[in-house]
Every structure is written in structure tokens, then in C-alpha cells.
Image (cartoon, rainbow, N blue to C red):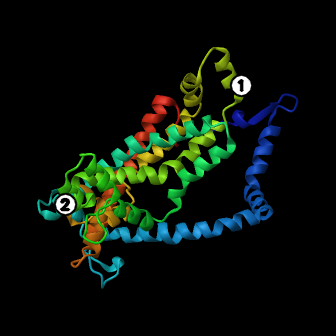
Amino acid sequence: MKDRAVDFLEFDREAQVYRISPEQAVRDDVEKHYWRHVGLTVMKDWRLYLMLVPMLLVFLFWRYFPMYELLGCFKVSDDVVPVSQQLFSGFSYFKRLLAGGDDLSMQFWRALRNTFILSFYGLCFGFPIPIILALFFNEIRSNAARSIYQVLTYLPKFMSTVVMTSLVTMLVKQGSLTTGMGIINQALSNLGLISNEVANAGLLNNPSFFRSIYQISGIWESAGYDSIVFFAAIIAISPTSYEAAQIDGADKMAQMRYVVLPSILSTIVIMLITRIGSLLNIGYEKVLLLYNSNTYVTADVVSTLANRVGMGSNPQPGIAAAAEMMNNVIGMLLVIGANTIARKASNTSLY
């Protein structure tokens, strides 16, 4: 709807004419010299903007420029010819993955199922643990003791994926004449939880144990580091809220339930939305280092499948790109859906 004159003009009864109001004059001046103000602000804080340049370059070269190669999902794969000169193939790769009926299509559906299951287990078991840790850290009265516990829980996050997976492999490795089986295999075998045959073969060679190993090692690696956000939200709660709860007779558990959790609910919702957004984006490096041909049935995910198909003995980069594209599109839809539900249910959303 177009603006009317009376919406931004004032009527001068003495002169019987419309004049621009002082507020509108200020708005017009700001709009007229908008870029001048932006330039002055940039020049004033040029050091801060200079620090943004490396990050912008990283996103430009490693995030945006590679998007051009996504055209390979819709073109005939040919490593010799550039993507811009390849022939358009439509949705043939997607059709083959979804309804091809061949072994590759079966592997894709299996990988998609494994990706969702691993991510869903991580959401169910891995997401609450940082919140619980943050609540525990908040109840520790000694600053020195809390700092020690926090450092011990943060430490695994700063280990590389290769080091972490190597430790996991050593703990659950198969038995040999020289080194013997892993300490976890021995403990579970002595407790009668697994048979000696399974312990000697190694837990990582058994498809039934891969998901448990993946989730437990993931919680051990990232739970402490992920608790930082929730702990920061907890310490920002006003002490008067605790005092009011104590006056009403609330004990520690009641304070957690009625004071702490409602106060950090918005943070929990935002973190949950971002976690759901990456539900299908599993860190394939960890899976790649832990899985083997014996555990493909439960360990193979979309990213590792794309890695094998796109860089194997008979590379098919178009199929690999299509698999990753579908994975990312589903993740985007999950973000939109989770954000919509959170906005309607709790009036808190990511955007």
C-alpha cells in the first residue's frame, strides 16, 4: 500500500500547506547520508573489521566457492572436462540413489538410515549430558575444585579426532598373541556381558557394538565442552531468584527444577534447534577411522558412502555429490521444521 501524504507530512493551518515534520526530516537525512554514516563507522573501527577479513576469506574459499561444484549433481561426471562444460543430466543421479534398485541404491538407503540413527541417538543421549554437567558445576562451591573438574571434562575436546579414535581402538581392540585384547573387552568378558569370542574378535569388528562405542566416545569427547554454553546461562541467573525460592522452602532439586531450568530454557531451545539442524551431518572423519568392512551394516553413513563412491577405484563424483546434496537438503528441512515448532510452542526460535 502506498504511503499517503498525511502519513509523513504535517498540515500548517496558518499557511494552509503541508510541511515535512521534524521527525520525518531527521529520517530523510539519515536515509540520504546512510552510506556516509556506514563509511564513518567502518573507518572508526577499521581494526575490528580488518580482523574479519581472514574469516571472510575462509568462508569464501572453503564454503561458497565449492558450491559451484554442486552442479556436478545434475551433470554427466567427467573429471577431464570442467563442470561448466559437462552435459546436463537432470535428476538421473538422484533417481538412481532413491529408486535405482541396484546395490548402490541399497547402500544409500542403508547409509541414510545409519546416519539418522546415529544422529538421533546422539540427540537423545548426548544432548542432555552437557545440561546435567552444567547443573553439577553450578552446585560446586569451591572455585578451585570446579575449575579442575571443568578442565578434565573439556580436555578430550582438544584432542584431534585421530588421537581420540586411536585411544578408543586401543581400549576395544581385538586380542592378539603379543598385546592381548583391549581393557574394555577384558572387563566386559570378565563380567560375563560378552562372550570370549566377541572379546577376542574386538568390539569394533562387531556391528552390534559400533553405535554404542560411537555414542559413548562422542559423549566423553564433547559433553564437557558443550556444557560451557549452559553453564554461562546458569551463572547469569540473578541470585535474588534463588533467595526467593529458598524463602518459599525450595531445596536444591526444587531450585534446579523451578529456577534454573526455566531460566535457561531459551538457551536449551536454541541449542536444540542447532543440534537438530546438524542431525544428518555426522562427523564422517570419526566414522571413517572407526569403521571397517565388517561393520558397514551399522556404521556406514552418507558421508563415508560418498567418500568411497567419489574417491574409490571406480570414482563416480556425480553420485557422491548427489548423496551429499540430499543429506544437506534434509538437514535444512529439519532446521526449518524444528525452528517453526519451537517458535509456536515456546515463542523462542533461532530466526
Q: Amino acid at mark 1?
A: Thr
Q: Secondary structure at mark 2?
A: helix
Position of residue 99 in the picture relative to residue 133 (left or right): left
Front one among 133 and 9: 133
Q: Quadrant of the N terminus?
A: top right
What mark, if any, has residue 240 been given in the picture?
1
Between the residue at mark 1 and the residue at mark 2, the CA separation in whole angstroms equals: 57 Å
Residue 316: x %, y % from top left: 24, 74
Asked where in the image residue 175 lies, by quadrant, the reply is bottom left
Front one among 47 and 227: 227
Residue drawn at x 25%, y 51% is 189
Q: Amino acid at mark 2?
A: Gln
Q: Residue furthest top?
A: 248
Position of residue 312 in the picture relative to residue 328 (left or right): left
What mark, if any, has residue 143 been given in the picture?
none
Asked where in the image residue 204 lies, by quadrant, the reply is bottom left
Residue drawn at x 38%, y 71% is 69
For label 2, the residue is: 107
* Residue 81 shows in the view: yes
Task: Indicate which label's residue lies in the foreground, 1 or 2.
Answer: 1
> Can you say whether 270 is above or below 330 in the image?
above
